[in-house]
Amino acid sequence: MRDRRLTEQRNPSSQRVDELDPLGIVDLINAEDRMVAEAVGEEREAIATALELAEAAFRAGGRLIYVGAGTSGRLGVLDAAEMPPTYGTDPEMVRGVIAGGYEALVRSREGAEDSPDDGAAALDELDVGSDDFVLGIATSGTTPYVLGALRRAREAGARTGFLLCTYPSKELLDTHDVVIAPLVGPEVITGSTRMKAGTATKLVLNTITTGAMIRMGKVYGNLMVDLQVTCEKLRDRGERILEEMLALDRAEAAQLLDRAGGHVKTALVMARLGLDAEEARRRLEDVGGVVARAVGESGH
């Protein structure tokens, strides 16, 4: 019987890929990759729901927790790891859990995905609770480790979601708060879900966390302003943001940043409203950290 999972079906377009020259291989893979963004776009409403769930978790003091195995797990850990350096978040705010532990990031441990109990135990170690949003990632929709982790998360009262790249079962749809299923079709190499499915997964995770960070006030206009100066690279970026947003010269931007304790958001509010650092921080806290709310939309 033919496997119903798209991730396990043969792609008719690539059944003679082994006969192509290098340029032909590149063109074929590129043609298949062009389908990915469209498939992700078809899931726009579900992705927006996941974004809202992540924001709600953050505002409640909870976390966004990704759970996956293999490529799916690595992509979740990668997305989580990129949040602190990009948006200045606490490393606990977005967490990635991968079957087999962090060793599995660099050395495949395929058998690790087969135990639902191990998935549940990983969530127990994180002390998952009702303020958290747990997103399982399994392109096939059937990974036992992920299913076990999500079951434990539901038992603990957390909101849950599922990201897969095949047709979702009724059970998945009925069980979780959101199901995201970009149907990218069979892979160029059958079952190699690090390809189109992996790309779709990365696009979805990028959108969820970027959108949630925007909603949490980490962005003003399209600039990453929740920036604390901790090195020369970040000082340069912070000063350039203040130069551009406030029409200052570099020396003025540097002085303002120093008065703000090295925090770009605080500096913006200080300059826009004529406040000292302490009052600017209080104003930001009152509006959930969103600069536009603190200074008014005209501040752009």
Image (spheres, rainbow, N blue to C red):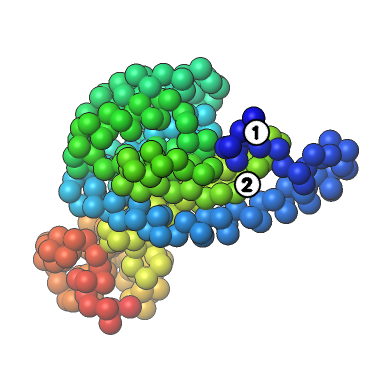
Task: Tell me which amino acid carries mark 1.
Answer: Arg
Q: Position of residue 92 (x, y in %)?
A: 28, 38
Q: For residue 185, which numbered disc appears in the image?
A: 2
Q: For residue 2, which numbered disc appears in the image?
A: 1
**Residue at the image point whose x is 58% and y is 37% from the top:** 4
Q: Position of residue 129 (x, y in %)?
A: 20, 35
Q: For residue 120, which numbered disc appears in the image?
A: none
**Residue at the image point whose x is 32% and y is 40% from the top:** 175
Question: Looking at the rendering, in which quadrant would you find the N terminus?
Answer: top right
Q: Is residue 15 above or below residue 47?
A: above
Badge nearest the viewer, 2 or 1? 1
- Which is more toward the observer, 287 or 299? 287
Question: Looking at the rendering, in which quadrant would you find the C terminus?
Answer: bottom left
Q: Secondary structure at mark 1?
A: loop
Q: Position of residue 19 (x, y in %)?
A: 88, 38
Q: Secondary structure at mark 2?
A: loop
- Which is more toward the observer, 285 or 32? 32
Tell me, yes or no, if residue 134 can be seen here.
yes
Number of on-image labels:
2
Other residues around mark 1 within 10 Å, as few (<14) / some (14–19) / many (≥20): few
Is label 2 in contact with label 1 (beta carbons under 8 Å)? no
| Outermost residue, bottom side | 298
* 61 relative position to 149: left or right: left
**Residue at the image point whose x is 88% and y is 43% from the top:** 21
Tell me, yes or no, if residue 231 can be seen here.
no
Q: Is residue 283 above or below residue 57?
A: below
Q: Tell me where residue 187 sits by quadrant.
A: top right
Q: Is residue 58 above or below residue 156?
A: below
Q: Tell me where residue 25 sits by quadrant.
A: top right
Task: Tell me which amino acid carries mark 2.
Answer: Gly
**Residue at the image point whose x is 39% and y is 40% from the top:** 172
* 48 relative position to 113: left or right: left
